[in-house]
Image: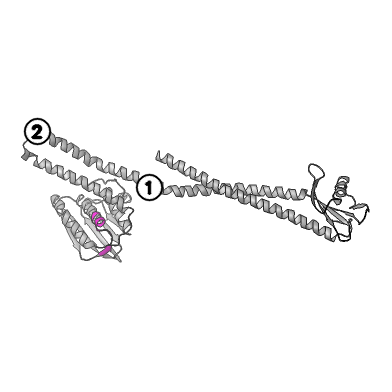
Amino acid sequence: MDEARLTLARRRSVAQTAGAIGLVLLLVGALMYVLTIGQESRALDAGLTKVLAMAEDVDDPPPGQFLARQRAGTSPVEVTPNTSPALTRVLHDAIGRPPGRYERSLGDDQPIRVLVARRADGSRWAVAADLAPLHRQQEQLGLALLVAELAGLAGALVAAALLARRAVAPLATALTLQRRFVADASHELRTPLTVLHTRAQLLARRARTQPPERLAGQLDQLVADTRALGEVVEDLLVSAAAEHQPLPETEVDLAAVAREVVASMSAYAEGRAVDLRIAAAGPVPVRGAPTALRRALTALVDNAVGHVSAGGHVTVTVDRRDGRVAAEVADDGVGLDPVEADRLFDRFAHGTSGAGRRFGLGLALVQHVARAHRGSVDVTGTPGGGATFTLLLPPA
């Protein structure tokens, strides 16, 4: 439905834009036609006026023109030799009229323009010109303008389509992002909600038959499930915000943030018998959002701890490298297949081993946070040889 509305809006925009441009082209073309025709008509009148002013007799007018003269008094009308009888009658009739311009016709397709003038010596002159060449020029001009109008309309349609697509693109992008977020939320929340609901049902059933002290462990599991659900929700919200928010101007000590993350994740690492260490020589300032950076580092540590067997190690290192600040999280766990490197940060793509989220929303969040801070994420590793994720940011 939304795609249909966007398509309809795009088509309407194309039609309206093309119609507006076509109307402008039509008005400009009509104006050009009228001005050009008027200019050619005035040029013909100027030429006929010049002929009347310079003519000494009727014998040798310019090609396509015919002269008539009546001397002062009642002398007969002289006409250019070889003038057709019909045109001769037109000239005889015109020379008796007041000075001015007259339009006549020798037939359906023989329009004639006649210009009449009176000289100071009392003589009357008339010159006639065939308007067929002028009409042919007008037709050619009209045809040329029509072709130009059609070409302009075609160009307007193409331009309108491009403009409409560009105008609707942000709406389509917003719709895609909205659906993507809804899909992310439903996908990521489905499993923990199902587990939470099932555990709550079992707990409610057992509460009727078992003493309260025997339910303590199950209640702890329920609390852990709600905590995991809250972390997923927080990941979704931070991911959505980090994808589009501008770079904050707050100065943040990334080494201090890393120490806070390690301290908060220590209990989780100890529960999995993983040695979580930190090597951070502070302060190492960057500009950014402390909450987003803390969540990104937490995702990297959670990812590393989840892919290390009992007795393994995870080391968080924060230092400066080649003019940038690097926050490195290295583990000696199951590693990763280089073939999967291209999809490491795709949302909801999962690796083939480990208890954590080697791939998925957590790492997608890290990438979004890095981009929002004009940084990047590098990853190296081999199957069975551990993995290293490095968050690289510009220094403050």
Q: Residue at x 46, y 43 (%)?
A: 9
Q: Residues within 10 Å of mark 1 (few under 14, many from 20)?
A: few
| Residue 358 seen in the figure | no
Instruction: Determine which residue is flagged by label 1.
Output: 174
Image quadrant occupied by the C terminus: bottom left
Residue at the far right in the pictured view: 75
Q: Position of residue 20 (x, y in %)?
A: 54, 47
- Image coordinates of residue 226 in percent, x first then y, are 18, 44
Query: Residue 15's spot in the image, x, y percent?
Result: 52, 44
Question: Which of 85/234 is in front?
Answer: 85
Q: Nearer the viewer, residue 223 or 259?
A: 223
Task: Kindly indicate the quadrant of the structure image that contains residue 281.
Answer: bottom left
The answer to if 105 sits in the magenta stretch is no
Q: Nearer the viewer, residue 202 or 45?
A: 45
- Left-right relation of 40 to 99: left
Magenta span contains residue 294: yes
Give SS at disc 1: helix
Give the image's coloring scheme.
one colour
- Tags 2 and 1 touching, CB below 8 Å: no
What residue is drawn where x is 83% and y is 58%?
A: 52
| Front residue of this view, candidates 357 and 142 | 142
Which label sits on residue 208? 2
> Which three-letter amino acid code belongs to the residue tagged 2?
Arg
Q: Residues within 10 Å of mark 2 (few under 14, many from 20)?
A: few
* Span highlighted in magenta in the image: 285-295
